[in-house]
Image (cartoon, grey):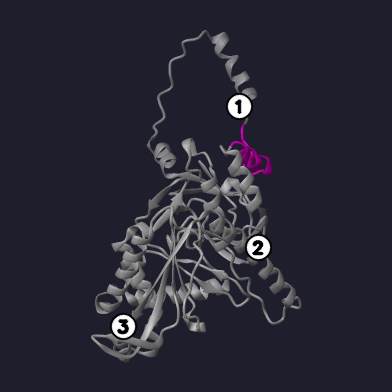
Amino acid sequence: MADFCMPSLGADMRTGTLVEWHVKQGDRLKHGDIIADVETDKGIMEIEIFMDGIVEELLLEKGTKVPVGTVMAKILTEDAAKTEVGSVPSATPTPTTPPEISKEIPKEIPKEIPKEIPLATPVAAIAQQERLRVSPVARKLATELGVDLSKVQGKGADGAIQQADIERAAASQVQSVTEKPVTEKTPAKSSSTSDFQAGMRRAIAAAMSLANRDIPHYYLETRIDMSHPLQWLEAENQRRSIKDRILPVVLLIKAVARSLVDVPELNGYWIGDRLEVQEGIHIGFAISLRQGGLVTPAIHHADLKTLDELMTSMRDLIARTRSGHLRSSELSDATITLTNLGDIGVEKVYGVIYPPQVAIVGFGKIAEQPWAERGMVGARPVVTATIAGDHRATDGMVGAKFLQALNVHLQDIQNL
């Protein structure tokens, strides 16, 4: 039996309100299923479950305000379910004790074994946290960054929570801040916006301070001729309806994903004292919010998606980010981040790495620039691409190979 608890969806989150259950008692669950909608002061989030099993009991009603870490449901895990289904009651054994002794045994059993253990209580949640194996440094850092220890998965010996685990959780919390919808009829609109921006800035400040303090950044840049990619895109879009047309940024996302296949060292996390390269390529795409701040939800398996699928995913993420309806995995799974500020006129972007990621890619605007080739000088549409890398995980040679691969894939755009 496993407990499904109210997750922490932000550095400043203490409680959440259960908006709706998406499951009922007896439903079978798969890893990644949406189990509930939860509202915080930053918006409504779709909460996923990360185990297979069967809903044994829903402990809370819709509309309940729930502290972080409180048990909301009991899940019969897949292994436990198989054990229950496969067990066969044994035949009643022949008594081997004298009748006068066997009569006394049932009287004692109820006194020793309670009928029910109240798991869904604040005391149980506190006790669970106290049983966690946490290093003193990690506990202190968790307090400073507002990280809920009960929601951190320890990577140390026997599941012990270490400093690197807290850093990773803190980075995820920055990405979990989403926009709360504000209607025109809300009288305290300016106050709500101010509170949102203050909370966003505190969360970003915590993560970026951590990144600048602990990550030795190196920066590289290159100019890429976008003549061929844009010509191909223009011809492709001419054959499409307006709603099905592809934006130039989608070409950049796909080229980054393909380049990570060639240079996988940049697709991973720095955990503890080593690089953990990730198999899935999940690109965090920086999205600005109307109330200020950035959220970087992940486009999962970007290297396996077609350009049309990437366009659909990007539109969907932007809409749900700005309405406050993101899945928890979209806020925590990014293996690298892409930031593109070209649409507001920025020529170059030098990003700060989101820990525990080990790289961030930046793109400026595509602009006409002088370009010399084969002794001839002319004007070409050019974009400046940058890479910020974690020098603990890789070096400038790896970053240079990535930028080289990026240029190659953009010039071979028809085969992306």
Distance (Cα) linking label 3 and label 2? 40 Å
Q: Residue at x 62, y 74 (%)?
A: 292
Distance (Cα) linking label 3 and label 1? 71 Å
Q: Which residue is mark 3?
A: 229
Residue 126 x, y percent position in the rendering: 66, 41
Magenta part of the protein: which range?
115-131
Q: Residue furthest right?
A: 187
Q: Is residue 327 above or below residue 340?
A: above
Residue 78 x, y percent position in the rendering: 42, 44
Q: Is residue 351 above or below residue 126?
A: below
Camera-side residue of 103 and 212 = 212
Label 3 or label 2, whichever comes before in sequence order? 2
**Helix, strand or loop under label 3:** helix
Q: Residue at x 43, y 18 (%)?
A: 93
Query: Do residues under tags 3 and 2 come within 8 Å of each other at their CB atoms?
Result: no
Mark identifier at residue 113: 1
Q: Residue furthest front?
A: 375
Q: Is residue 321 above or below residue 150?
A: below
Task: Please state the total of marks drawn on the protein image.
Answer: 3
| Circle nearer the viewer, 3 or 1 | 3
Distance (Cα) linking label 2 and label 1? 48 Å
Mark identifier at residue 356: none
Name the amino acid, label 2. Arg
Name the amino acid, label 1. Ile
Name the amino acid, label 3. Pro
Classify mark 3: residues with Cα within 10 Å, few (<14), some (14-19) or many (20+): some
Q: Which residue is mark 2?
A: 202
Residue 223 x, y percent position in the rendering: 37, 78
